[in-house]
Image (tube, grey):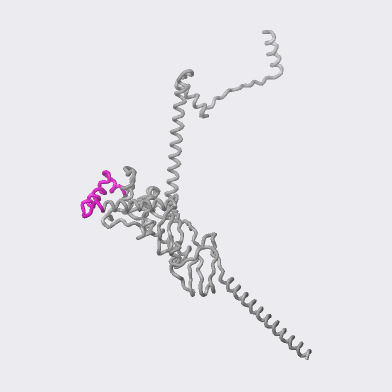
Amino acid sequence: MGELFAQSLNKKQQKRLAARKGKNMISIIIVVVLGAFVLQGLKRIPASPPHKGQATFLGKRTPGKVYEEGWGFFPFFPYLIGFILVKVERITFEILSEKTRTPDLAESQIPISLTFRPLSEKLIEYIDSGQEAGVRKQLEGAVRERIREWCMGTQEGPMDWKELNQSQLEAVSVLVRKIAGETLTPIKEYAQSVPTWIWLRYFSQPQPTKNFLVNEEDWAKDNWQKVREILKQIENSENGAQKIEELKTAVKERRANIEALRNGNGQINLPDLGIRLERLNLGDINVIGKVAEKAEEKAKEEQERQAEELELKFVRERIAEFMLPPFNYDKDKALEIVQTERGKVSRAIKDNRITTDTTTAEMIAAILGRKS
């Protein structure tokens, strides 16, 4: 009986041990599964360079939902909940419009610098635009097309390469209008008979009075008479005073937009591309080809002429100085001294040496001895 009881007890203990082992194994499996679940869903959105995550659910993008930088838990990533990683740092690049012609057929290189940043609330549009590469391509196309039209136009833009170098304000204005479109404060229809860059010039402080470009001269002559006549017509129309104030406000805001873009502080949103344009500016414009060679030759000639004028002024001042006390030289003598100082006249001292034979030398010595 005792042996049977002992065997029964051992069997029960073995069952208990087996049950405990089973429970432990189940616990381990649960921990492993939960750990794997947590680890597979634990993802980090980088902070340097700055990124954001466009939220997705079941593989579809969720409009208006964006994940910030840092760690986050995304169950069954990317099948259930996920994100598309998007770099949101400032992106700066340069467009070089090569061989751009003005109406005088001179070719110039025009560098245009742009900076943009993706909009967090428009990441879907930014992704649809191809992110950085796609947006850059679209901006380059728009800028190149508009800058060529502006340079070759006869009703707007510069008439020659010299005016091109003086037209940066107008260039930025037309490029901003091309890129930003309806997002800018509009110049109302009643003021469209005057180009925007003319309004910018007219309302600038102080108002320009000289050095106008060819396309500005007709508007600016007689103290901006043509512009003032159009303003008078607007003022005499219905709600004229209000329209004038609206025009001034629109021009002021457009100028502020342009200045901010030139300084890199722009805040122009382009929702179709999903970006904010922060900088748009023209660099140093270089004329190229034969016109550049002629311009360089002319510049050198001008520099040489100015140097000659400066040198002649110095000569005149030195001559006048030598003609005054304590020198009191006459004009010719003063000129000779100045020219000697400048290395234009050399003064030579001749040193004549006579070679004699020994007999002649002794005779000369004897004669000199007798005289002494």
- The residue closer to the viewer here, 136 or 89, is 89
What residue is rendered at 59% in x and 74% in y?
A: 34
- Tell me where residue 305 sits by quadrant: top left
Specify the quadrant that holds the C terminus: top right
- The residue closer to the viewer here, 70 or 93, is 70
Q: Residue 365: horizontal and vertical position, in percent?
A: 69, 13
- The residue closer to the viewer here, 260 or 17, is 17
What residue is rendered at 45% in x and 58% in y?
A: 116
| Residue 335 in the image: above or below residue 42 | above
What residue is rendered at 49% in x and 24% in y?
A: 336
Relative to residue 283, is residue 364 drawn left or right?
Answer: right
Q: Is residue 289 visible?
A: no
Specify the quadrant that holds the N terminus: bottom right
- Tell me where residue 298 sits by quadrant: top left
Q: Can residue 368 be seen in this view?
A: yes
| Residue 291 in the image: above or below residue 91 | above
The stretch drawn in magenta includes residue 229? yes
Relative to residue 47, is residue 11 drawn left or right?
Answer: right
Q: Residue 210: horizontal and vertical position, in percent?
A: 32, 42
Q: What stretch is highlighted in magenta?
A: 216-242
The stretch drawn in magenta includes residue 261? no
Q: What type of secondary structure mainly makes up the magenta span?
A: helix
Q: Which residue lies furthest to the top in this view?
A: 371
Q: Residue 108: horizontal and vertical position, in percent?
A: 42, 52
